[in-house]
Image (spheres, rainbow, N blue to C red):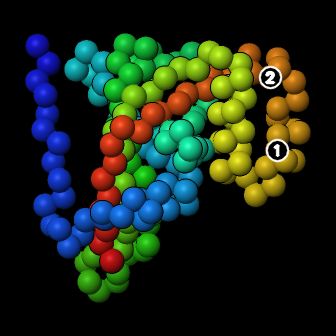
Amino acid sequence: MIKQIPRYHVKRKDKELTSQADMQAIIKRGQYTVIALCHNDEPYLVIMNYGYDQTKNALYFHAALEGQKLDFIEHNPNACATIIEDLGYKQGECSHSYRSVIIRGRIAIIDNLDEKKHGLNVLIDHLEKAPDEAKKKFLKNDSTYDTVTVLRFDIEGITGKQGL
């Protein structure tokens, strides 16, 4: 039997981010996330860059065709991720300025060609300064999508925190 872990709230309410707009802004500006996965009581963390699809409330990732993260996702699609907006260390104060979000949800391995195309477009649009040039270079034809795995992280819950 799997023990359910209670969902905790930020203990210091003065540090809690409650605005959905503020939390979405952190996701929109971020470029990478740390994702926590688990299989048979073995934890696994992986850092990945992402693209944010606000309409689907999802993050898209690209990965190799095989590997440890895919094995973990196939066995347990539940995931937790964090995105941190680092605003710098405060010299002489032993403190750090930041804003961060913790995201909970499920990760799906995408097989559908149209959604793979959508996911990679979202990723490139999010990360590249010249997305059209990158798409021309890397997404030349449909066979391109046979060489990459596309993942979608469906956001089911989000909390935010800040230390300014």
**Residue at image point 42% right, 20% down:** 73
Is residue 115 left or right of 86 when viewed as pictured? right
Q: Residues within 10 Å of mark 2 (few under 14, many from 20)?
A: few
Relative height, residue 21 to residue 133 (above, below): below
Whether residue 40 sits left or right of residue 135 in the image: it is left
**Label 2 to label 1, Cα distance in Å?**
13 Å
- The residue identified by callout 1 is 134
Q: Which residue is mark 2?
A: 144
Q: Disc 2 marks which amino acid?
A: Thr
Residue extending farthest bottom: 92
Task: Tell me the kind of residue under disc 1.
Answer: Ala
- The x, y position of residue 155, in whole percent, is 41, 39
Which residue lies at the image location 31% right of the left edge and 24% below the top edge?
Answer: 38
Dot 1 crowding, Cα within 10 Å, few <14, some 14–19, many 20+: some
Write down the quadrant of residue 78 in the picture: top left
On screen, residue 133 above or below 67? below
